[in-house]
Each structure stands twice: as structure tokens, then as C-alpha cells.
Image (spheres, rainbow, N blue to C red):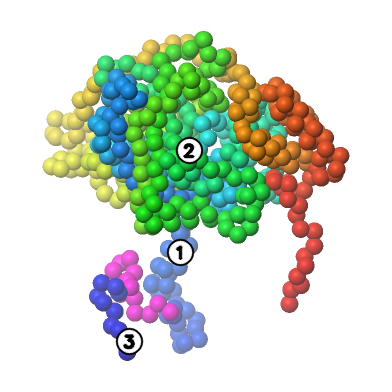
Amino acid sequence: MTKEPQDNQILTNRQGHPITNNQNIRTVGNRGPGTLENYDFIEKISHFDRERIPERVVHARGAGAHGYFEAYGAVGNEPVSKYTRAKLFQEKGKQTPVFVRFSSVIHGGHSPETLRDPRGFAVKFYTEDGNWDLVGNNLKIFFIRDAMKFPDMIHAFKPDPLTNIQDGERFFDFCASSPEAFHMVTFVYSPWGIPANYRMMQGSGVNTYKWVNSEGEAVLVKYHWEPKQGIKNLTQKEASELQATNFNHATQDLYQAIERGEYPEWELLVQIMSDGEHPELDFDPLDDTKLWPEDKFPWLPVGKMVLNKNPEDYFTEVEQAAFGTGVLVDGLDFSDDKMLQGRTFSYSDTQRYRVGPNYLQLPINAPKKQVATNQRGGQMQYKVDLAPGQNPHINYEPSILGGLKEAVQPGKEYTPFIEGELVRASIDRKSNTKQAGETYRKFEAWEKDDLISNLVADLAPCDERIQKKMIALAEEADGEYGKRLREGLEKAVKSGSSQKPLGNRGGDKAPQEAVQKGH
Ligand code: HEM
């Protein structure tokens, strides 16, 4: 017996009209032709035609989850208020809702999650003062230190514009000519370039930010997330084996762990440095290709994050989520880190294009507090940001007829003094390879082995001039590192395994023959 559909489960169109036939378009006779007034069909198909929005230009593949951040009320053994007045950190046990999106960087929306790549670790804190986005990666440093180079870097790393295949030669061509990238290359080509999943990786804000206290005094700060689940990375062999059976493993792992009630947790730690140039260091504190040494700048815990709820809909929440480095709250500030400044323009710019000018009205992006602006209109304006009782005629400020008023400055304003010649110039203390050597020496034997074998596999098919430059950088970083890379490459070139496959990073050869015949 057919069950009558419940009233609240009847299929409608978006005008609220019940759909009585969802199987057939309206036609002249049951063999057609169709008619142009097929409203329900045209609505259905034309919405389907628009189901996708542009992918993120980087970090297209990702997974997300909801949870909360809980403050310790202290930074290490000191009261956190000494350094920042940001409200979310002040009180021990205070919880702030968060949404997190993890991602890989270079390939498209359904690319394998086993690829060698940094991983994105973006956190949106819905604080009582509005949103704070901490847009980080799993690794603590980056390839470049000037935002001017970002589009070139991404072009070199993304697939070749002609073959549409990622090409190690293009990757290393850029990196060999950008020696500041060598430290990051050392991490990315080691097992640290393939985290086992999202739950067992660290996170880091990478760029240098500032904390500002109620006296209007600032310090430099770096943020790090430490997984309570431990850290696990994969060798290339393990990743290839996994990829052969599952290319969604990281998304699946996160989703299933949360469904099982095994909520992943990370501790948030900060490194603090007094504001200034720090001439005593052999690197610039604003250079994001450098680690701040832990012995001089200890990691101080400030809180923890728990992810305990999966998204209800991937597109609504994960795909439309928009994070940006400009999204700070009172007590947090920007440093002069040139990458950070470039990034801060880029995120909201791309989101106005990718999601639309009213992307901040979507529930996943809107703060969980009252929003009252004089912004009006634009595609997909969903509502008007009116304060309760606000005169709706007054969408400007100042006004004596009502309308919105400026807020009171919450603490002493932080007003750094800046002067200098306007120039286009790189920083002085480049120290491009020293920390790469330190990182290499810290790796365990299996990590070193994997690093060398991965570099050899991808460098072997490259132009000799690129190989030479990469070997020189490795030698500069560490004698043993350079020697092993040189010897590995010589051996690979001699054995003929260096033949360039058609632009295929990872060294796999394209299949030579089709083995199956068509009908
Ligand atoms: C995503 C630009 C460096 C982490 C993005 C997006 C852009 C972008 C345009 C896409 C955003 C979207 O469509 O919503 C840049 C520029 C950079 C830079 C111009 C350098 C000048 C970095 C660095 C990190 C990073 C150093 C790590 C700290 C991320 C993450 C995402 C992202 C995690 C994905 C956010 C999400 O899950 O939606 N970046 N980026 N980016 N970027 Fe960057």
C-alpha cells in the first residue's frame, strides 16, 4: 500500500509550489516535443547548471568540522592579559565556538588526499567581539617571504598550462631560483609533506602577528596547534599504497572519528617575542621562511580546541566558508610581515568573487553576535544588517536622525610609529639555507631517507641546471644532505631512471599502450 506523503515532506519548487510529477517534462503527447513554459523543469535544470561556485584558487580540496576553543586564562605561567586583551583568552574555561577547515593546497576539489603538499589548517573563532580567523598550515614556515611572488609560485606548482599535468621541473625551476624556499622544500619532500590524516597533524599561523594589551603595548606572536592525537606522517610508499585504495582518506578519517564520538583536540600554543627588529638574531622575525627557535622562544599554551560536530551540509558550510588573515578581534593585530599584508588583501578579494559580495551574510561566515552595518545591496543580499530599533531610513553615518553610532575604543589604541623610504627591496637577514640544515639534522633516519629518495625521484628528470642549483642549496644547508642528494642524483641519472615522463611530478610513467579494446 502506498503511503501518503506527510505534508511536511512534500517536494516543492523554490516558489513553494508542490511538484506532482518529477519524472517527466511537459510535452505535446508522450513523445514530445517539449514546451518552453516547462517552469518546474527549467527551474530544476537551470539551478543544477549553477550548482558549482568557483573552486578556491588554492586549497580547493578540504574537509571541515565544528567545535569549540577553551581558554586556559594564562599564557604559560603568566596571566594572558599581560600580553593581549583579546576577550576569548582571558577567562580560564571560557568556550568560543569554532569552525575549522583542513585542506591540501595545489590540486582541485576532488584530488587525492595523499598528495605531497602543505595542508591548510584554518580556524574561525566566533568570539563575543566578532570573528577571528587564524588561517594557517600544518607546517610552520612557508616557501616565500614576499606576497609579490605568490601568484608565480602557485603557477609553478599547479599543473602545466599546456599539458594540465603537475611537473616537478616547473616546481624545482621556481624553487631553485627562490633559495628562501629551500627550508620549506626540505619539509615538504620529507614525510612531513604527507600528513597521515588531518587529526594527526600540527597547525601553525606561520606568519607573525601581534598581541596588544590594555595599555596599548604590543608583542610579536606566532601561533601553533599541537594535536593531542599525536603527529603521524607517511612515507611516499605508504602514501602511494593508500592512494591506490582510497583518495578521500583524510576527509573520511575526520568525519568518522567525529561520528564515533572520538573528538580530535589540539592545544593552542604561542611564541612571543618583543616587538622590534631583533638584530641579535641571524634571521628576521618577520620572515615566514624561518622557525623561531624553541629554546629562545618557548611554546606557551593558551587553550585547547575540540572538534565535536560534522557539518550538516558540505557545500553550505565547508565550500562556502571564507577565512581571511584580516579577520582579527580587539587585542590581536597585524605585524609588518610582508606576506601577511599581501594575504590580508587577497582573501576577502577572492571571496567576493568566489562566493559573492555578501559572503559574510552566510551563516557559516557571519559572526554569532549582532551585526549592524550601513552596507546595502549587492548580489544575494539576504537581509539588512539593522540593529534592533534602528531607523531603517538611515543607512549612513553620522546622522542626527538616528542610525548607527561608532563604538567606544575598547582599550588604549595601539598606534605604532612607522617611517622609512618607500622601496621595493628584500629584507637584509636572508639566511636562506641555515635552518634547512638544522631541520635536516633533526630528522630521524627514515625521514632523511625518504626526503632524499623523494627529491631524487622528482629532480632526476629535471634540467641539469636546476639539479645543480638544488644540490648547491642542499650542500650549503648541510654537508651530508648535499652529498646524499648529489650521489642519489648521479646514480639515478646513470641508471636512466631520470627520463622525463610527460611532466609528471612523482616520477610515474604514463601508460604506453592501451590494453583494453573498445566495442
Ligand atoms: C587559501 C592567498 C599564503 C593558508 C587561500 C586563498 C587565497 C590565498 C586567494 C583562497 C581563499 C578562498 O577562496 O576562500 C594567499 C596569498 C598568500 C598566501 C596571496 C601569500 C601572499 C598562505 C600562507 C598560508 C596560507 C603562508 C599558511 C599560513 C591558506 C589556507 C587556505 C588558503 C589554510 C584555505 C582556507 C580555507 O580553508 O578556506 N590563500 N595565501 N596561505 N590559504 Fe593562502
**Left or right, residue 187 beside residue 511:** left
The answer to which of 367 and 451 lies nearer the viewer is: 451
Q: Residues within 10 Å of mark 2 (few under 14, many from 20)?
A: many
Percent of width and height locating residue 144: 58, 28
| Residue 448 inside the magenta-drawn segment | no
Q: Quadrant of residue 325?
A: top left
At label 3, the amino acid type is Thr
At label 2, the amino acid type is Gln
Q: Is residue 151 above or below residue 336?
A: below
Q: Main secondary structure of the magenta part?
A: loop
**Left or right, residue 198 beside residue 510:** left
**Left or right, residue 96 beside residue 159:** left
In this rendering, does residue 181 appear at all?
A: no
In the image, what residue occupies the spot 46% across and 33% down?
A: 204
Which stretch appears magenta? Answer: 11-23
In the image, what residue occupies the spot 45% across and 52% down?
A: 254
